[in-house]
Amino acid sequence: MALDDSTLRYDHRRYGYDHDRYAWSMLAERPPITWPGGKPLAVWINVSLQFYPLNQRGVPFKVPNGMTMPYPDLRHFTLRDYGNRVGISRLLRAFDRAGVQATYAMNARLAERTPALVRRLVDQGAEILAHGWTMDHLHTSALARDEEAELVRRTVDTLRTLTGQPIRGWLSPARHQSWHTPDLLAEHGLAYCADWVNDDLPYPVATATGRLVNMPLATEIEDQFVMGQNLHSEDSWAEQVCDAFDYLLAEGTARGGRLFALSLHPWMVGQPHRIGALEAVLDHIMARRDRIWQAPAGDILDAYLARTAPTAGQGAT
Amino acid sequence: MKEALDVYEYWPYEGRPRIRWPGGARVAFWVAPNVEYYEIDPPPNPHRKPWPHPHPSVPGYGIRDYGNRVGHHRQMALLDKYGIKGSVSLSVAVCEHHPELIAACVDRGWEIFNHGIYNTRYTYGLSEDQERAMIRDALETIHRHTGQACAGYLAPALSHSEHTLDLFAEVGREMFGDDGGLYTCDLFHDDQPTPIRTRSGLRFLSVPYSLEMNDTIVYTVNKVEPRHYATMLKRHFDRLYQEGAESGTVMCIPTHNYQISCPHRIRAFEEALEYITGHSDVWVTTGRDIARYYLEHYYDTALADIAAKQTTTTAAGG
């Protein structure tokens, strides 16, 4: 039984993309930018602080790294909770030691449940990003627009109240989006989104509701991706992160500014046998501090906006 | 369904007529960058789901877009550096979506060959007429944007019908005479080119493409560490180079600009390219040139040898 002839119809086969969210542009052909101080590489280090509920619904799919066993899956629940209790302390100490200013993408429900953790981060002046309500509240097209709008509103309102910060950044749970997510983020006053991994520089996103920038937060060198999904050793992870950093620093020096973004999960890299790999990575990065600009994402966004006119070749509005 | 496709005969690796590549090279080495487009909202196909999650599947779409926005130029610069012309396995809709990328390949004299319209449109479920129309559309698109007569085919997302090879050879020959529809990359049965039987009797062959060395298989299926990929590529080459002293072999590195061009992986790829092109007696070439050279010098000899060996078997058995 052959398929309908519509299978050979291609309604979006045209210049640019098969969607209108952002403009087509090759990184190598954009005008070069430099970061503050004339630095070729901006370095953003983000920590995701996540709440994987025990009563996971798994709708429309089970979030990666969530519960996998019959209820109550205490094993995965507590392995993830370990990160927010113990792992995070090791990460904070490592950042202190290396002189790194990280950002923290936090599930709003976790912020409600762990006020002491919020206080600790806010007191040190760290930037908090919204990371959705919980890891089980996925933003996908299975949600109606108004349901998703309510989820975004509740998430950012909660985090704004608990942190006293403007909350400018967004990272969706598991980086999934619906067709409406970018519109809803702009509508709720978010300035940037870290879900998309299609570039080594920020770039503007078209929304129906306001200004939004994608700040690519690389997945491919994430701790949970390399060690958790690919099952590579912690030594290999450190080597891969350092290789990526070295490459982008060299390319940034030769071809114009680049963004190096490292995403971390305290339940993964905060384990005693892995934290040394993170310390080695931070040492490697900060040993080159004279050539990099290590900053929170909000500051990197502002520098990017100051350096690029919204219509400079890649502008989607 | 058939027990086997039976488009080639059993033909043992040892004792074949000796292949000597141009200049006496032992290994014909080619790099096949896949330049793909996965649609953000493809229509459903009852035989295979394009994305594992509800559309838009941002994680998967995003990293593939990274390949075209960022990775492609990096890979091109590396191939330039080592004097390699890529043989692009192309989702031909990229000609329309990203013409600048295609122009950069054409300017370098790279080969462009057919890899379907989109990598989210499968051969599964198409009637023969529909599949023929898809192949013709692809070859017309490549010709319109690059001026090239398409010689090779890697079916989109490695999705096939029983007639995929027949149809590609027929459409290629109809459109471009002896320059079109020469070879397939879809068969992984050999380390040398082999004649492939088509229902219309056209001269057609398989050029080794290697799924084992394909970066996507290596990185996402086999989950290999980046630096180990360099070791694998070097070992693969070493053995084909050694055997190539007896009779010429083919080594292909099939790549994806969203895999090997990531900052944590590109160094491994460069290391392999530097190693391989640093050897003498390596013919750094394209898929099309391997196919043409083989057709001109070895195809008929191979057919005769294959036929002779089938006769022997039959005689012994009868």
Image (cartoon, rainbow, N blue to C red):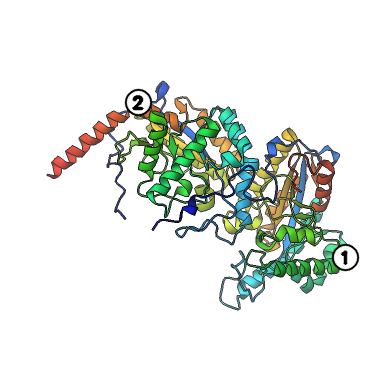
Residue extending farthest bottom? A72
Name the residue nearer the viewer: A133 or B55: B55
Question: Mark 1 — residue?
Answer: A164
Question: Is disc 1 on the same chain as disc 2?
Answer: no
Q: Quadrant of residue B310?
A: top left
| Kind of residue sitting beneath label 2 | Glu
Callout 2 crowding tier (Cα within 10 Å): few <14, some 14–19, many ≥20: few
Q: How many marks?
A: 2
Q: Does residue B87 appear in the picture of this structure?
A: no
Give the letter of the chain under mark 2. Answer: B
Name which residue lies at 70% across and 55% down: A263
Q: Nearer the viewer, mark 2 or mark 1?
A: 2
Rendering coords of residue A108 (x, y %): 76, 68
Question: Mark 2 — residue?
Answer: B296
Query: In 3D space, how far apart are the residues under numbered discs 2 and 1 (Cα atoms)?
Result: 75 Å
Rendering coords of residue A132 (x, y %): 73, 65
Rendering coords of residue B167 (x, y %): 38, 42
